[in-house]
Every structure is written in C-alpha cells, then in structure tokens.
Amino acid sequence: MAEGLHPPLQHTAHPHEPKEDDLEKFKKWQEARLERKLRGEYESAVFHLAELVNQNLETSLSVASVRVDGATNTRKSFLGWLIQPWLARHTDDRASKTNNLQGALYTARGISHILQETDLFHSVDAKIQRSRDYLAGEGDVDIVVTTREKGRFYLKTATEFGNNEGSVSVTGRVRNIFGGAEFLEGHYSAGTKTRRSFQGLLSLPLSPSLRTTGQLSLFSQERDLSSFASCSEILHGLKVAINSNWGVHGVHEVAYQAILRHINNLAPSASVSIREHAGQTIKSSISHSWTKDTRDDKLAASRGYYCKLFQELAGLSGDVSFYKAEVESQISRRPISGMSLSLAARCGLLRALTGPSHFSDRFQLGGPLSLRSFKANSMGPRDGVDSLGGDIYWSTGVSLVSDIPRKPHWPIKSHIFMNAGRLDAMDGTKGLSENLIGCLRKPSISAGVGLIYRFDPVRVEVNFGVPLVASKSDGVRRGFQVGIGMEFL
C-alpha cells in the first residue's frame, strides 16, 4: 500500500490540533487570567475591609497595652520610653472623640513608625487585638507589634574618591550596643592627602521622638599640606555634639571641641610665616550650625535650595581665641525641560580676639570645588611658595547645566560656569567694614565649560576654563581641570 503513495503528500493534521506556539500562548493567557482574578479578589477584599473600617471608625475602643515581639536585643525600658508618649496621648484623650477605632489605628501607626525610625528593625508590623487582660473591658484592645531585628555587626572596606583625593578605608559598626539604639562606629582610612585618619563615634537618641541625638567622637588625622604649604598637620581631638532635627525648620547642632594641632614636617623651602606657626597648639571651642536643604538632588540639583550657617567661638581655654562664622547657600531652578540653573554663594569671617589668627584656623580658597580655574587652596596671601590662608573670603558661582542632546537619561551632563571670589587677610589698621568693602571690590573671576558625571556618592567634573581676572598672589590654572567631590560651588 505504501508503494501506491506518491509525493507530494497533503498535510492531514487536524486543523484544531494545538501547536507548540499555541500552547505557549494559551499558557500565558491562562496565567494572565489567573492573575487578573487574584488581583480582582484582592482589590475586592481591600475595598470591603476599608469600607468596614470606615463604617466603624467611631466605635469606642481603648488601648490597654502595647506588646513588642521579636526585639530580643533591645531594652524594654527603651521601648517603653519610645511608646509611652503615643500611649499617653491616647490615654489623655479617653474623654474625647479620639478614644475610638480611629484613635487606636493612629496610635498603632505612630508606634510602628517610631520603631522603624530607630533603624534597628528589618520589619515592623502592628496589629490590634482584643485585650488579654482578665480585667479588660469590652472596648479594650492591645497593640501587638511584631518586629525582626537587623544584624548588630557591620564591616565594610572601600576605595573612596572625594575632595580631590583618593583613599582606602575600613568601617566597623556595632548597632544597638547597649540595647537603646546606640551606635558605635570606628572608621580608619589612608589616602593621598589625608595620609591617615581615624574616628571613633558613639551616638544615641536623647528624645522619644528621635529628633534629638547626642554624639561623642574621638578623632585623629595626619594631613599632607605640601600642595599649597610646606608642611604637614596632625590633629588629635574630642568632640561632643547634640543634633536636633526641627523638620521643615532645619537641623541644628551645638558642639564642643578640644583639638591638639601640630604643624610639623616642614620642608627646607618653608617660608618664615609657616615656621612661625610650627609646633603644637590647643583649640577649645563651642560651635553652632544650622542647615536646611530642600534640593531634589544633593549632587546635581534642579530645584530647591540649600543653606548652612556655622559659628564658632574659641578661647575657653587653649592657645587660640577667635570668632569664626561661615555661610553657604545654593538655589537651583529648571527654566526649561532638560536644563537647570544653579546659583551658589559662600562667605566667611575669622576675627582673632587676641593676637593674629593661626594658620590652622584660617580659610583656604581655590580649586575645582570652590573656585574653578584656580589651583587648590592657592588664593589669598602668600609668603614665597606657601599659601597662608585668609581671615575673610567670599565666592559665588552660576552654572547652567543641560542634558546631553538625545541622551537625557545619561549620567553625564554638560555645563557652562562663571565663578568669582576673593580671599584676604584682615588688616588690623582698618575697621571691619573697610576690610569687607576692600575684599568685595577686587574679585578674581573665571569662566569655562565642562562635563559633569554623576558617580554616586560623588560628582566628577572635567572642565576647561580660564581665569578672567586674578590677583598676583593667586595660583591660576588655565585649561583642563578635574574635580571630584560632593560639594561644588
């Protein structure tokens, strides 16, 4: 019979027999259908639950107790310290309209939020259950918070680039060391300019709202200043600070510092001015800073503003006595899509209360992070090859940043900039107003173009610029200049 068959033969498969592609399509259709069904059931359940809750918001309920499960490494007294203000707020309102389901839900949400803010837990889930107390009334409920704690120990090694230097670092941290959201951190780094740096920091909350924290730190640094002064500097210090976050009103910090400074390792070419400041000095000072930041991006803002005010008074003891103030500000706007305009300004004043100011306390200006197209820390008074720093300075800059054409998603942006500023020493024969006016009248100015690359957590700039106006003592940098850091003018 096979001999009677002659090609070509017709395809005799059943027209409705499924193919492999049809089976794959059917499988995807079935999965999508099941997903739509489950989503619909979930949305329906959420809708009915929300409707049930809304209909019973005025139901009389009272929170009898709060239980926290899973917080094995956290002190009960600390948890009570955090929770008590929320529970007291609900208890004080027993005679008011908030003593109901709505008030209990608000209390549960507040407790869950404050526990999450401690940064001690991976997850925090709050539930309202009927009270287990034998003496509980019909409307008494318990808030049960189920938590899962984070690990207590943390160790990280990193290679870092910022403020135009590179470093390798090791950071170790112990979380919740005493069971009250305390953090103990140690950080050691070795770099190109800051040869060695160590900091030990202990921080702990000082208020149940967690908006106020206390910090105690010990630190040590060895910095190579030979790029602008013929010396090195070693610092050993202690700092005690209280930080308070006032929300929309900014962040305040009040601190005390005691630092032993040592100007050493003088080069043979060191100037007489640098040699006069060589040796050890002790600074003992109190300071206050206020910061407010509404920028949408700290590295490349397109809207919002930033403002910081810093004041320091030294002379409680030690070898130096002065008043120091510094102001930083930046405002950014997006005039058209794909382009942002940024205006920044900084200024500072150092007023020695006894004798001349010390080299370690003076301001330095210049470089890709502060005043582009000038060498780093090369502006202001000089003695030979050494930049001596100044007592009064100002700087301002405007930048127009735009996306790369047809590539708005790229992390690379182009910008045009113009910077101006000046650094001077205070002339003791003149008044403060005369010194200020003299500093403002003779600015150094630069302009140029460049590329900005966002390399989290730092910003990299490659600029081509020229100084338009400069003083004789300023160290200028014509042509290309690279900057790496987090805070640019």
Image (tube, helix red, strand yellow):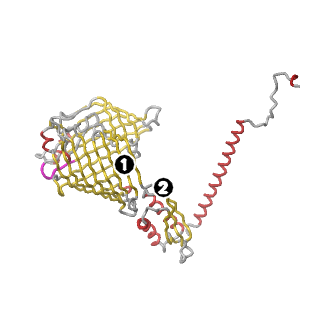
Q: CA distance from mark 1 to mark 2?
A: 21 Å
- 50 above or below 463? below
Extent of the magenta region = 349-355
Residue drawn at the location 55% of the way across and 77% of the way down = 134
Q: Amino acid at mark 2?
A: His
Q: Amino acid at mark 1?
A: Thr
Q: Can you give x and y, in whole percent of width and height, for residue 419 in the image?
A: 29, 37
**Left or right of 199: which side holds 7?**
right
- 483 above or below 56? above
Does dot 1 land on a helix, a strand or a loop? strand
Q: Nearer the viewer, mark 1 or mark 2?
A: 1
Give the quarter of the image for residue 193. top left
Instruction: Name the residue beneath numbered marker 2.
Output: 122
The numbered disc on residue 171 is 1
**For the view shown, which residue lies furthest in the left direction?**
429
Residue drawn at the location 65% of the way across and 48% of the way down = 35
Q: Can you give x and y, in whole percent of width and height, for residue 54 in the image?
A: 58, 63
Q: Is residue 352 magenta?
A: yes
How many residues crowd around disc 2 within 10 Å: few (fewer than 14), some, or many (20 or more)?
Answer: few
Judging depth in this view, the residue of 193 and 398 nearest the camera is: 193
Evaluate whether residue 118 shows in this view.
yes
Quadrant in which the C terminus appears: top left
